[in-house]
Image (cartoon, rainbow, N blue to C red):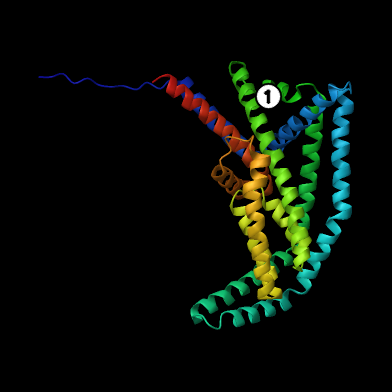
């Protein structure tokens, strides 16, 4: 008779306590996720400021003076934007809200004229789309009070981020010292190595995206103004912001611009379609290779998924930290793949 062996799994009290501590730590991190997001965003900003401060130090400008120059320059730029760009945009938004019922009637008539030769089902679906769009826009504008509260909360959070980032940037290697403080000693060097790689890759990506967003925004404003599309400045702002979303962002902003042009006339919509098509070709074959050629490793699909997940979990703040977290996760996965390949 064959003797059967019995497998036993001994779980010590210490192991149970370690698992409980990990679970408790994760629960605590989740409960303060908004604060952690603010700190993480402050680290990213401080890292960017640190590079500029180091640049100024090479020209014998003290670190405090270099950091002050960066923040003063940012505040001056923000004031210029608030003074020259925000008032016209708010005026266009106000005008859009006032004339929204008229635009709905115009859109319905345009769709009726355009769809007379097609099936009734398709024409009905187009009219339902316009009606639903009007309801969504009206719903957004009716929540002005809640929007104001959200904006105030965002301003307070932004102030906290600036203060933390300023404190970190004032110290030489402030971000690295902070990471050393919160990282176990055994993993210090590895965490710092990963952060340096993420910092370089993220800096190049962000620089390229900002340049693309500014160029696309200015181009959309000039182009739509020349062909007579209303709300050109508002549409340019949308195009510049949505440029951060690969593939889908430019397409979505183009559809909005074409729809606004369609409210005026189908001919203007065709002109807007041609303009966006030409601009997309210039962006894909000239601007992207010119500004993004040094950037590797940030897959557009990963960026899209990261932004969607970030928006779902944390709103605007989640979107702001989504790409940095995805970049860090990509570096960790690359290291894991290299270790597995080395053991084969």
**Residue at x 64%, y 34% (from the top left corner):** 294
Front residue of 157/341: it is 341
Q: Which residue occupies 75% across, 61% down?
A: 223
Picture quadrant of residue 85: bottom right
Residue occupying the point 80% across, 65% down: 92
- Figure check: 98 above or below 117: above
- In the image, is 3 to the left or to the right of 172? left
Residue 277 coordinates in the image, percent (x, y)? 63, 59
In this rendering, the answer to whether 85 lies above or below 26 is below
Q: How many marks?
A: 1
Q: Using the rendered image of the protein, determine whether residue 256 is visible from the camera's viewpoint.
A: no
Task: Please say if 9 is above or below 112.
Answer: above
- The residue sitting at the top extreme is 186
- Counting from the top left corner in percent of width and height, residue 194 is at 61, 25
Mark 1 lies on a secondary structure that is helix
Q: Nearer the viewer, residue 170 or 247?
A: 247
304 relative to 92 in the view: left or right:
left
> Is the C terminus in the top left, top right, bottom left or bottom right quadrant?
top left
**Residue at label 1?**
179
Can see residue 180?
Answer: yes
Residue 16: x, y in percent?
47, 25
Give the image location of residue 153, x and y in percent. 77, 49
Image quarter (top left, top right, bottom left or bottom right) of the N terminus = top left
Circle 1 residues within 10 Å: few <14, some 14–19, many ≥20:
some
Pick the front one: 342 or 141: 342
**Can you tell which quarter of the image residue 123 is in?**
bottom right
- Examine the image and state in which quarter residue 166 appears: top right
């Amino acid at each position: 008779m064959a003797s059967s062996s019995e497998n036993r799994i001994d779980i010590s009290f210490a192991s149970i306590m370690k698992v409980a501590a990990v679970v408790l730590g994760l629960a605590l991190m989740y409960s303060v996720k908004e604060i952690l997001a603010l700190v993480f965003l402050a680290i990213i900003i401080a890292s960017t400021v640190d590079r500029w401060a180091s640049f100024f130090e090479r020209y014998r400008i003290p670190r405090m003076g270099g950091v002050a120059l960066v923040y003063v320059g940012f505040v001056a730029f923000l004031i210029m934007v608030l003074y020259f760009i925000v008032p016209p945009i708010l005026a266009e938004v106000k005008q859009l809200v006032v004339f929204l019922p008229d635009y709905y009637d115009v859109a319905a008539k345009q769709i009726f004229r355009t769809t007379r030769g097609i099936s009734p089902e398709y024409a009905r679906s187009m009219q339902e789309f316009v009606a639903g769009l009007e309801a969504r826009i009206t719903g957004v504008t009716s929540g002005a009070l809640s929007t104001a509260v959200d904006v105030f909360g965002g301003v307070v959070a932004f102030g906290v981020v600036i203060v933390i980032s300023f404190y970190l940037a004032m110290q030489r290697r402030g971000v690295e010292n902070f990471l050393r403080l919160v990282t176990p000693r055994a993993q210090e060097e590895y965490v710092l190595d990963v952060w340096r790689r993420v910092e370089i890759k993220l800096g190049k990506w962000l620089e390229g995206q900002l340049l693309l967003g500014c160029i696309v925004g200015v181009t959309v404003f000039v182009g739509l103004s020349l062909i007579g599309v209303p709300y050109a400045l508002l549409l340019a702002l949308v195009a510049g912001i949505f440029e951060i979303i690969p593939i889908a962002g430019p397409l979505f902003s183009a559809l909005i611009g074409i729809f606004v042009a369609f409210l005026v006339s189908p001919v203007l919509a065709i002109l807007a379609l041609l303009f966006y098509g030409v601009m997309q070709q210039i962006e894909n074959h000239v601007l992207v290779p010119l500004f993004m050629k040094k950037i590797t490793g940030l897959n557009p699909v990963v960026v899209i998924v990261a932004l969607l997940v970030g928006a779902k979990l944390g709103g605007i703040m989640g979107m702001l930290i989504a790409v940095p977290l995805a970049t860090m996760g990509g570096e960790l996965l690359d290291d894991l793949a290299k270790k597995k390949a080395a053991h084969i």
